[in-house]
Image (spheres, coloured by chain):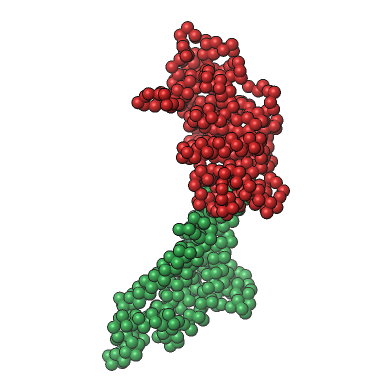
Amino acid sequence: MMYMIRRFILLITTILLVSIITFGVFQILPGDPVRTMLGTEADPTQIENLRSELGLNRPLYEQYTDWMKGLLTGELGNSIRFSMPVTDLLSDRLPVTMSLAGLTLFIVLLISLPLGMFAARRQNKWSDMSLSTVTQVGMAIPSFWLGMILILYIGMQFSFFKISGYIPWTQSVAGALSTLLLPALTIAIPQIAVNFRYVRTAILEQVQLDYVRTIRSKGMSEQNVMYKHVLKNSMIPILTVFGLIMAEVVAGTIIVEQVFSLPGVGQLLITAISNRDFPLVQGIVMYITVAVVMINFIVDILYSVLDPRIRLR
Amino acid sequence: MDQPNEKQVLLEVNHLKITFHLKNGKQAKVVDDVSFTIRKGETVALVGESGSGKSITSLSIMRLLPIPPGEITAGTIKLNGKNLLDYKNKEMSTIRGNEMSMIFQEPMTSLDPVFTIGNQMIEGIRRHQRISKKEAWGKSLQLLKEVGIANAEKVIAEYPHQLSGGMRQRVMIAIAMSNNPQLLIADEPTTALDVTVQAQILKLMMKMKEEHHSAILFITHDMSVVAETADRVLVMYAGQIVEEAPVRELFMNPKHPYTTALLKTMPNLEMDVKRLPSIPGTVPSAYALPEGCRFAQRCPFAMEQCHSVLPEVIHMLDEHKVRCHLFTEEGVLNHDEKRNFA
C-alpha cells in the first residue's frame, strides 16, 4: 500500500513539473502567437487589444495559475487557430491516436514475446542468430521511411487497406483495421526488434539462475519451467523496457499520423506548433505527459503484482 | 568396485567420466573414472575440496548437468539397476523429484522468488502423485511441520524472501522429501548457513531420512559433518575417488596421504596452534592433469612411480578402497621401510 501511495505522489509531482516546463517553454520560444495570428501588416493597437483579450499581458504566475485551474476542471481554453475549445479538439482526435497506440502495443507484444522466448531456447543456433541479425536491421529502420514503403508495397497493392483517413471501430472493425493496421505496423516493427532482444536476454538470464535448477530437480516439465517460472520472472525486467516502449509508441504516433494522414492528436500537434497555437500545444503536451506518466504508473503497479518483493517495500 | 552386498544396492555409479568443453576449445576432465555404490537407507558422504568434481558428480546423477558445456563421455549411473543415462529427458523427469531429489548449497536463491512456498511445494507433489490441490496443500502443510516450521499455515502462503536462509533450507528439504525419494542428494546443504543453524539442519536431514527411509548422498568439504552423519565416506581429489571406507575406519585408519592430510586440517580443541593446518600446494587444474597420481605433487610420500603411473584402485579389507601406490591388496605399505604412518 505504501508502495502505491509513493508511486501516486510521484505521478502527481511529475505532471506538475511538466506543466511548469510546458508553460515556461512558450515564454522562451521565439515567435509571437499574436503576430502570427494577425500577420505582418497588423498595427500595434490591434496587437495590444488581442494580447489583453488572450490575457497575455498579465503577470506570468497569474497566467500559469489560471491555466492550472483550467487543467483541473478540464477547461484548457480555446484554440487560436481553430477557435474551438481545446478539449473538444482533443476528444475528437483522441480515439484515433488511442486506437493506433493500442493496436501497436498489441502487435509488439504478440510478436516479440513468443519470438524472444523462441530465440532464447535456441541460443546460438542458426534460427536465433538470423533472428538477431534481422532485428538488428529492424531497430535501425526510420519509421517515416518504413511507413512509405508499407504504403507503396502493401497499401497500394491490396485493396483492403486504406492509406489515408480513419474509420472508427464503432462503425466497422474491419474498416478501422484497414486504416490502422499499416500505421500500427510502422510503429511496431522497430519496437518489436527492441523488445525481442530484451525478452531474449531476460530469459537467458533467468534460465541460468539457481531456482530453475531446483524446479528441474523436482521433475517439472520443460513447459512448466519456461512458461510458468521463467516467463513470470523475466516479465519483471521486460516490463521496465515495455514502459519505455509504450512512451516510444505514443511519440511514434506523431510522425506516423502525418505519413498516413490519420486525423489523430499527433497531426493536431504539428498543426498547432506551426501556427504557434499555444493553448492547443500546451493541451496536447499535457495529454502526452499524462498518458506517459499514467503508463509508468500502471507499469509500477504491474511490477508489484508480478514481484512480491516490491509489494513489501 | 561393483560388489553386490547383503543390503540392496540403490545407486551404482560405474566408471563415470565427465568432460567440460570450453569456448576456447579447451577440455577439462572434471570427473575421471568414478565408481561407487549407495545402498538403500545408507548415508554416504562425498568429501573433497572445491573443484574436486563432487558437485559435478552429484548433478550428473540427477541428470541436471548442463550439457553442453558438460559431456558424460563414459560410464553408467544405475538407480535400482536401470541406467539413468539411457533415459530420455521426459522419462528422467518422472524420476527426478520422485525416486530421487536434491537440495542445494544456496538456499537464498534456490526457490523461485515470485511464487509462494505453497505453490512451489504443491506443483512438485502433484507432478508425481495424482492427488487434488487441496490434498496436496494439506500434505505440504504437514511436511512443513515435519521440517520444524512451527507457523506452517503462515509460511505456506509466504514468498521465499520473507524467510531466513535456515527456513528456506527447511522448505527445500520439505520439497525434496515430498514424494518420499529413495535417494536424497544434498550438495553442501549447510555451507551457506550460520553455524547454529547448520547443526539443526543436519539433525533434521537425519530425522527426515529415517522417517522416509531414504538414502543420502551427502556432498561436503567439512570433515566434522562427515563424522556426524555418514555411514560411509568417499574421498574425492581432482576428479577421482582416492579413498573409500566406512566412516569409523576412515577416521581411525586413513590410508591415502590426501585423506590423512585432510583429517589433519580438522581443527580440534586440543590443538594448540597459532595457524590452522593446511595442505601445501594446490589442486592441479583440470586442464593440465599430471600423468601419474594427481596428488603426487603435494604428497609428502611421493615416490618415483607416483609421478609417472596413475595408481589403480586397491581393494583392501573392510570395504576399504584406496587409489595409491603405497598400498597393495594385502594392505601393506609398499615402502614401509621408509614411511611411518602413525
Residue appearing at x 49%, y 55% in the figure? A309
The quarter holding residue A178 reads bottom right
- Answer above or below: position of A162 versus A201: below
Total marks placed? 0
Query: Which chain did the image draw in red?
Result: B
- Answer above or below: position of A300 versus B316: below
Q: Residue furthest right?
A: B130
Residue appearing at x 47%, y 24% in the figure? B262
In the image, A207 versus A128, the foreground residue is A207
Q: Is residue A191 visible?
A: no
Residue appearing at x 42%, y 26% in the figure? B269
In the image, B78 versus A117, the foreground residue is B78
- Answer above or below: position of A62 versus B297: below
The quarter holding residue A106 reads bottom right
In the image, B26 versus B293, the foreground residue is B293
Where is residue B25 drawn, in percent x and y? 50, 34
Query: Which chain did the image draw in green?
Result: A
Q: Is residue B23 left or right of residue B144?
A: left
Where is residue A249 drawn, in percent x and y? 49, 67
Q: Is residue A210 left or right of residue A52?
A: right
Residue appearing at x 63%, y 77% in the figure? A172
Where is residue B125 drawn, in percent x and y? 66, 47
- Answer above or below: position of B334 versus B298: above
Q: Is residue B312 visible?
A: yes
In the image, B90 versus A134, the foreground residue is B90
Looking at the rendered image, the quarter that the N terminus of chain B falls into is top right
